[in-house]
């Protein structure tokens, strides 16, 4: 919030008084109602400046600033089919990230890492894909290593669970169990919690790793975490549909790239054949010319 720092309350009260202050012989302003410290009159060419001091931590960046930070961190061109999805994704996550109720948690990290890996599957370079991930998370002023580590930790834990133990975390002790208990408490209203589509995807990913994808298990897990299952079902349906369309688009792109690659190879082969033919004909004419010269010399 902004704070007005250069105008005192005493001077404001003086300005609102019905009597206009008159300068004394010493050059200061004084009234019977005001006996405070003397004020030196400002020069005529000076201007009163009201400074508004805002705490930067209270002012979140704009969507444009977040997108610009991403582009500054990763300056290489990104194929359009991936770039368009990334730009839409970073806008959505920016809005989640800077909600007042937002607090990072490991299930959210599992969901985002899952989405990112599935959307970027088949990207031409693994190194570039990792660099894009780092630039993306850093643009949101978060830690990409924490995302990776937490996602790996929870997935490894889920692989050691079964359908019954997965939703029974509240009765056990452990690092991941404590993380889930904390989420459950915050979702119940005892702290900051903001449900999102990434959280829903993170839950489903944990169920997949535990081989427990039955709807009843998801219902028990949602109940244990104090999460609305209908919201989770809705978001998972939307995600599956979007992912299916994106996979189809990538398949069409792959077919197009393969077709264009084949055309380029055919053009190169045709060009090589033409060059070989030209060289052969040129060699024939050269040899024929030499033969004519030899016959001419012998007749002479």
Image: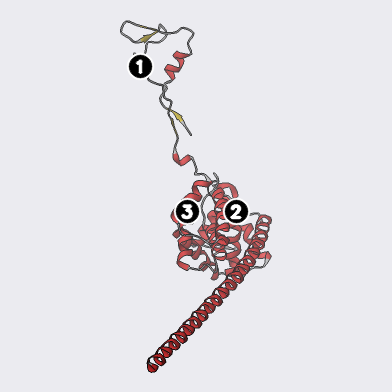
Residue toward you, 299 or 105: 299
In the rendered view of the protein, which quadrant contains the C terminus?
Answer: bottom left
Counting from the top left corner in percent of width and height, residue 59 is at 49, 40
Q: Are marks 1 and 2 in contact (CB under 8 Å)?
A: no
Quadrant of the image occupied by residue 251: bottom right
Distance of label 1 from label 2 (alpha carbons) = 58 Å
> Residue at horizontal 46%, vertical 14%?
15
Residue tagged 2: 196
Q: Are marks 2 and 3 in contact (CB under 8 Å)?
A: no
> Residue at horizontal 54%, vertical 78%?
270
Of callouts 3 and 1, the N-terminal one: 1
Of callouts 2 and 3, the N-terminal one: 3
Residue extending furthest toward the bottom: 298
Counting from the top left corner in percent of width and height, residue 146 is at 45, 58
Colour option used: secondary structure
Residue tagged 1: 43
């Amino acid at each position: 919030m902004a704070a007005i720092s250069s105008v005192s309350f005493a001077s404001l009260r003086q300005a609102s008084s019905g009597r206009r202050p008159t300068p004394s012989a010493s050059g200061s302003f004084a009234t019977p109602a005001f006996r405070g410290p003397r004020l030196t009159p400002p020069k005529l060419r000076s201007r009163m400046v009201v400074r508004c001091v805002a705490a930067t931590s209270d002012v979140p960046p704009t969507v444009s600033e977040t997108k610009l930070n991403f582009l500054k961190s990763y300056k290489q061109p990104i194929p359009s089919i991936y770039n368009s999805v990334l730009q839409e994704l970073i806008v959505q996550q920016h809005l989640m990230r800077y909600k007042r109720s937002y607090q990072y948690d490991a299930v959210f990290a599992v969901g985002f890492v899952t989405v990112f890996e599935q959307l970027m599957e088949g990207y031409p370079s693994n190194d570039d894909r990792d660099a894009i991930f780092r630039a993306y998370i850093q643009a949101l002023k978060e830690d990409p290593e924490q995302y990776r580590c937490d996602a790996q930790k929870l997935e490894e834990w889920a692989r050691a669970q079964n359908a019954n133990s997965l939703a029974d975390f509240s009765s056990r002790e452990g690092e991941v169990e404590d993380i889930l208990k904390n989420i459950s408490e915050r979702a119940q209203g005892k702290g900051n919690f903001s449900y999102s589509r990434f959280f829903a995807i993170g839950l489903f990913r944990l169920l997949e790793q535990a081989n427990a994808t039955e709807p009843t298990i998801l219902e028990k897990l949602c109940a244990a975490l104090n999460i609305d299952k209908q919201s989770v079902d809705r978001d998972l349906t939307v995600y599956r549909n979007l992912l299916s369309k994106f996979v189809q688009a990538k398949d069409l792109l792959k077919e197009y790239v393969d077709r264009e690659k084949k055309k380029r190879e055919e053009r190169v082969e045709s060009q090589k054949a033409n060059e070989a033919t030209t060289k052969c004909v040129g060699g024939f004419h050269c040899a024929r010319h030499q033969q004519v010269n030899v016959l001419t010399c012998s007749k002479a």
